[in-house]
Amino acid sequence: LRQAFQDAVDHGEVDRNPCDVVKPRKPRSPEKLIPAPAEVEKIVIAAEEEDPVWGLFLNVTATLGTRRGETVALRWEDFDFHDLRIHIRRSLCKGVRGPKELKLPKNGRERTIHVGEAFFEEILRHRRPDAWLFSGGRRGRAGEPWHPDWPGHRFQRLMRRLELPYTLHSLRHFVATQLLARGLPVTQVARFLGHRDPSVTMDLYANHLVDDIQRAMGLAAATLFRRASAD
């Protein structure tokens, strides 16, 4: 475009090349690291060894792709064991008027997620009479949900022990990239994750480098056409 506008300036068709005054684009943010399935399995197993409920928290997050505030706000009545559905109705945030505040999810809307039977079987093993899935803990009283900051701090300690470079939010990125890599429609992935605009899903996740997916594409590329065998 710069050269085309410059030609127009040289021929007197425009007074000034607009490319000379346009603001430079902001540098792209550094590539976010996303764990591979084998690493997520390792993370969940290590968490379960520390505490079964902590392992359940990471299992839920790495399956549903929920934000930490949505995960800690899950209640047992949000799980429909008959139709294998989960209702994401609320999110727990750090409140302005207090330490914790219940709100709608980040996009301002509730959503329903359908999940496979194996996941519900795992959830059922942990079912308790408490209303919240994740209550008590270091920064919560008995009968109250976990503080949304606590899982992030605990996850960082787990990453240091396992010598892995991820954050708790990396599990949400993991779910998104794996669903997109399996060819699922981006609009449906956005709905699953709770994004109002599917372009957000693409911008945040579709351009991330995922090693195992890159390897799979490399193997596929090697079979795109038939190569003549050497004599």
Image (cartoon, rainbow, N blue to C red):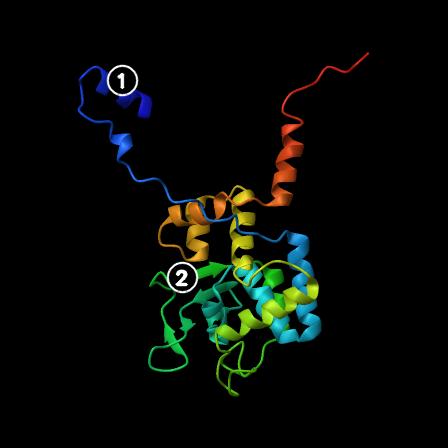
Which residue type does callout 2 highlight? Arg
Q: Position of residue 8 (x, y in %)?
A: 23, 19
Residue 123 seen in this snapshot: no
Which residue type does callout 1 highlight? Asp
Q: Position of residue 76 (x, y in %)?
A: 50, 75
Instruction: Say if 186 sits above or below 218 in the image.
Output: below
Q: Residue farthest to the bottom? A: 142
Instruction: Say if 20 sits above or below 228 in the image.
Output: below
Residue 220 as seen in the image, left or right of residue 10: right
Q: Residue farthest to the right? A: 231
Helix, strand or loop at label 1? It is: helix
**Do tag 1 and tag 2 residues touch (Cβ < 8 Å)?**
no
Residue nearer the viewer, 53 or 166? 166
- How would you rate the neighbour count of disc 2 (Cα within 10 Å): few for under 14, some for 14-19, many for 20 or more? some
Q: Position of residue 182 (x, y in %)?
A: 56, 43
Residue 136 as seen in the image, left or right of residue 41: left
- Check residue 111 in the rendering and tell me which mark sits there, or answer none: 2
Q: Residue at x 59, y 77 (%)?
A: 127
Of tags 1 and 2, the one toward the viewer is: 1
Q: Which residue is mark 1?
A: 7
Instruction: Say if 159 sits above or below 11 in the image.
Output: below
Helix, strand or loop at label 2? It is: strand
Residue 156 seen in this snapshot: yes
- How would you rate the neighbour count of disc 1 (Cα within 10 Å): few for under 14, some for 14-19, many for 20 or more? some
- Numbered disc total: 2
